[in-house]
Amino acid sequence: MPNLTDRQRVELAFPAYLLFALTSAPGVFVPAEPDLAARAEADIAAMRVDLKAACFEPLDDLSEKKRGALLRRVERIGKGVIVEWKDRSTLSVMLTLWYFLKDLTDREVLILWEGSAMERATSKLLPMFAHGFDGQERDAAAEAQARQLFARLQAEGLYA
């Protein structure tokens, strides 16, 4: 891991934290066929393992005390974002996070290295997210919400 600032470490851990929170919610991912439920559960469990690993990777080389401090920062900011999801549909949140991730990867703030935990998780998640891009109106709303999320995180000193 290159020499990263605390802010950069939080920025790298944060997308995985949000996606982990989303995948933790019951009923977020429902298989198209009821007989695929067991497979879907296993896929989601594997995805969550990868997301958890991706959240911790930027902090791996730190002391336990420093790692704990940065995780508390990720959680504090993350919980504030997640609280704002309560009145939104799951699909709306998914699409917002898709645009947020797309922006981060397009600007190379977040690089999804092949074989990394985040790449494995997003390679499973992104097709699920893309399923929601049926309506242009919803699409535009999700883009706007992703910009609001980004602005909120910039106010917290991230992604400046």
Image (tube, rainbow, N blue to C red):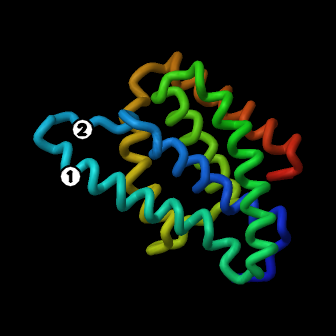
Vertical placement of 158 versus 71: above or below?
Answer: above
Residue at position x 64%, y 36% from top? 82
Q: Where is residue 5 in the image (x, y as percent from the top left)?
A: 85, 71
Q: Which amino acid lies under the numbered mark 2 shown in the image of this protein?
A: Pro
Question: Of label 1 and label 2, which has the lower sequence position?
Answer: 2
Compared across the picture, whether 123 is left or right of 89 comes to left
Q: Where is residue 22 in the image (x, y as percent from the top left)?
A: 51, 42
Q: Residues within 10 Å of mark 2 (few under 14, many from 20)?
A: some
Vertical placement of 145 versus 150: above or below?
Answer: above
Q: Mark 2 points at which residue?
A: 31
Q: Quadrant of residue 62?
A: bottom right
Residue at position x 54%, y 45% from top? 21
Compared across the picture, whether 21 is left or right of 59 comes to left
Q: Can residue 106 be seen in this view?
A: no
Does dot 2 land on a helix, a strand or a loop?
A: loop
Vertical placement of 46 versus 29: above or below?
Answer: below
Q: In which quarter of the image is residue 148?
A: top right
Q: How crowded is mark 1: few (under 14 residues within 10 Å), some or many (20 or more)?
A: few
Disc assigned to residue 39: 1
Q: Do the residues labelled 1 and 2 touch (CB within 8 Å)?
A: yes
Q: In which quarter of the image is the N terminus?
A: bottom right
Does dot 1 land on a helix, a strand or a loop?
A: helix
Compared across the picture, whether 36 is left or right of 126 comes to left
* Residue with the most extreme left position: 35
